[in-house]
Image (cartoon, rainbow, N blue to C red):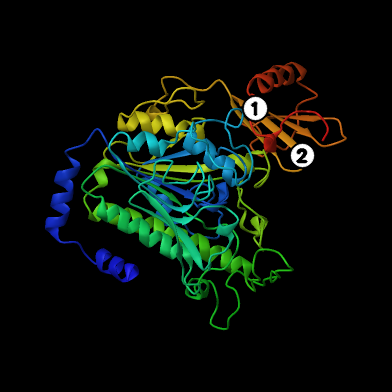
């Protein structure tokens, strides 16, 4: 029913509807709508505006930057999903965030989110897709953390199944588990709820957090989407394919993993285009910011082949790395009434800056005790009033990694159990691919960045995220 309604919606809105929407929007020009689209495991090189050699065209996503601004040095909160989302929503980096690893630990009562900040300023808030910061009945459930509406997955493990028999929904302040048709690709259902949310809230300020689940594995798009990447004889348009076999893992088998991945990125691009079309049709263009980015670098799970697609572009590393390929992500922002078209910026900022930036854009309160800074000026191609002296990350999945970025220089620490720690130093401006370790040649710079690394963090409050140097 919802999909049929949306097709009717896109076929043409009555002129009076658009006029009404524009009139309503003009009543709150100081509280623009915000749509934040977060792709899952999309690499820096998976967009043609960042990597012209990408074999998958992404014209709709690229248009966000062509009609707005494209940031080439923007960073995720972490190199995996849960902590990256924690940094995004709470404004804290991995030296201070509560959730510092890929876990099902919920946010605590004292962990405020950007949704709560905007909700308190009169915004209607909706979140659709993958949450990852608390299960139903915990202190981190989405209805407790500022969302008026929600539809999707509560944890990242469940989100691996695109044909699940249940999802979760928040309505009227209540969350419930609801049945889902296992023949329907969940991403399509999630997008239908997002379209409905925009339409239903067009006459008042709204915040839409669209935490899309693709192109994360499993690589199982609907057959009609896969078919677009297959030849009439059933072979892949991307050449000979090596099938992916499940082998007891969580991801189902896929005969054409290259074609399946391409189909998922194409579907993502199409739906971003539909979001733009809907905003325009409702007359909301001049008072709506649309952000697009990814939660971390590209994955190689379930048959995904980032090498074939050049998914990290010129960068080194993938998801679970603190090299640039694991944490540097594309960011495109479109807001015709606020951002000059065709801008490109190399301003360095990160997920934890989004919350205070949204506070500034919407004239909402600013949370205290966070790591993020207001980068609203950067959206107009200007220098922020205050910029970071450095950016910091940490990741622990089998071994400890830490990274500090200060200007052109980046230091990465590796500590494996039973082995001496190792440091690597790169000039990421001269060497964007981090091909030459300069640590031995620059001991003074290593010493400086090691000191920053030491002061950038506090002990983790939960023992799951023990970043100490003691052997375990």
Label total for image:
2
Residue, far right: 418
Residue 196 vs residue 425, the one in the foreground: 196
Q: Which residue is mark 1?
A: 404
The answer to whether 176 is drawn above or below residue 318 in the figure is below
Q: Where is residue 276? Give x, y as percent.
A: 33, 53
Q: Secondary structure at mark 1?
A: strand
Which image quarter: residue 261?
bottom right
How much space separates mark 1 and mark 2, taking CA atoms? 17 Å
Which sits in the foreground, 206 or 134? 134
Q: In terms of depth relative to the viewer, which is nearer, 287 or 204?
A: 204
Q: Furthest-left residue in view?
A: 16
From the top left corner, tell me how far across and down residue 413 is, in percent.
74, 30
Q: Please indicate, yes or no, whether residue 72 appears anywhere in the rendered image.
A: no
Q: Compared with residue 356, is residue 207 higher up or lower down, i.e. above or below?
A: below
Q: Residues within 10 Å of mark 1 (few under 14, many from 20)?
A: many
Q: Of helix, strand and loop, which one carries label 2?
A: loop
Return the residue found at the far front.
137
Image location (x, y in percent) of residue 324: 63, 39
Which image quadrant is residue 359 in? Answer: top left
Is 42 drawn above or below residue 349 in the view shown? below
In the rendered view of the protein, which quadrant contains the N terminus?
bottom left
Q: Quadrant of the C terminus?
A: top right
The residue closer to the viewer here, 230 or 137, is 137
Mark linked to residue 252 = none
Mark 2 crowd level (few <14, some 14–19, many ≥20, 10 Å Cα):
few
- Identified at 11% across, 56% down, the residue is 16
x%, y% of residue 84? 56, 41
Question: According to the image, label 2 marks what residue?
Answer: 399
First in residue order: circle 1 vs circle 2 = 2
Is 99 left, or right, of 351 in this rendering?
right
Name the front one of labels 1 and 2.
2
């Amino acid at each position: 029913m919802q999909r049929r309604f949306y097709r009717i919606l896109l076929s043409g809105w009555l002129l009076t509807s658009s006029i009404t929407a524009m009139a309503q929007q003009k009543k709150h020009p100081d509280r623009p709508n915000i749509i934040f689209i977060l792709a899952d495991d999309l690499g820096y090189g998976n967009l043609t505006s960042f990597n012209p050699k990408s074999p998958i065209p992404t014209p709709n996503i690229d248009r966000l930057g062509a009609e707005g601004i494209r940031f080439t040095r923007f960073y995720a909160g972490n190199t995996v999903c849960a902590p990256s989302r924690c940094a995004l929503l709470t404004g804290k980096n991995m030296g201070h965030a509560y959730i510092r690893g890929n876990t099902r630990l919920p946010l605590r009562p004292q962990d405020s989110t950007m949704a709560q900040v905007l909700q308190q300023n009169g915004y209607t808030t909706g979140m659709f897709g993958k949450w990852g910061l608390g299960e139903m009945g915990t202190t981190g459930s989405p209805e407790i953390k500022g969302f008026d509406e929600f539809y999707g997955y509560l944890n990242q493990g469940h989100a691996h199944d695109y044909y699940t028999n249940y999802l979760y929904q928040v309505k009227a302040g209540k969350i419930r588990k609801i049945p889902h048709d296992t023949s329907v690709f969940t991403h399509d259902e999630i997008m239908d709820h997002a379209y409905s949310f925009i339409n239903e809230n067009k006459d008042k300020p709204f915040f839409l957090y669209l935490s899309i689940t693709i192109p994360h594995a499993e690589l199982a798009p609907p057959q009609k989407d896969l078919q677009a990447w297959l030849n009439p004889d059933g072979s892949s348009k991307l050449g000979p394919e090596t099938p992916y076999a499940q082998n007891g893992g969580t991801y189902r088998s896929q005969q054409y993993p290259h074609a399946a991945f391409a189909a998922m990125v194409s579907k993502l691009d199409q739906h971003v285009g539909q979001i733009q079309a809907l905003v325009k049709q409702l007359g909301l263009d001049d008072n709506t910011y649309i952000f697009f980015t990814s939660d971390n670098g590209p994955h190689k799970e379930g048959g995904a082949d980032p090498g074939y697609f050049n998914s990290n572009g010129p960068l080194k590393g993938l998801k679970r790395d603190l090299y640039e390929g694991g944490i540097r992500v594309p960011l495109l922002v479109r807001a015709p009434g606020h951002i000059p078209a065709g801008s490109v910026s190399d301003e360095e900022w990160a997920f934890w800056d989004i919350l205070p930036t949204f506070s500034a854009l919407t004239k909402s309160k600013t949370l205290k005790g966070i790591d993020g800074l207001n980068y609203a000026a950067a959206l107009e191609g200007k220098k922020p009033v205050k910029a970071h002296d450095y950016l910091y990350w940490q990741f622990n999945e089998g071994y400890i990694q830490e990274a500090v970025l200060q200007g052109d220089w980046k230091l990465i620490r590796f500590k494996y159990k039973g082995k001496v720690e190792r440091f690597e130093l790169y000039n990421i401006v001269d060497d964007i691919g981090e091909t030459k370790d300069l640590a031995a040649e620059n001991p003074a710079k290593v010493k400086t960045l090691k000191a920053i690394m030491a002061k950038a963090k506090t002990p983790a409050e939960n023992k799951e995220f023990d970043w100490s140097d003691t052997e375990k």
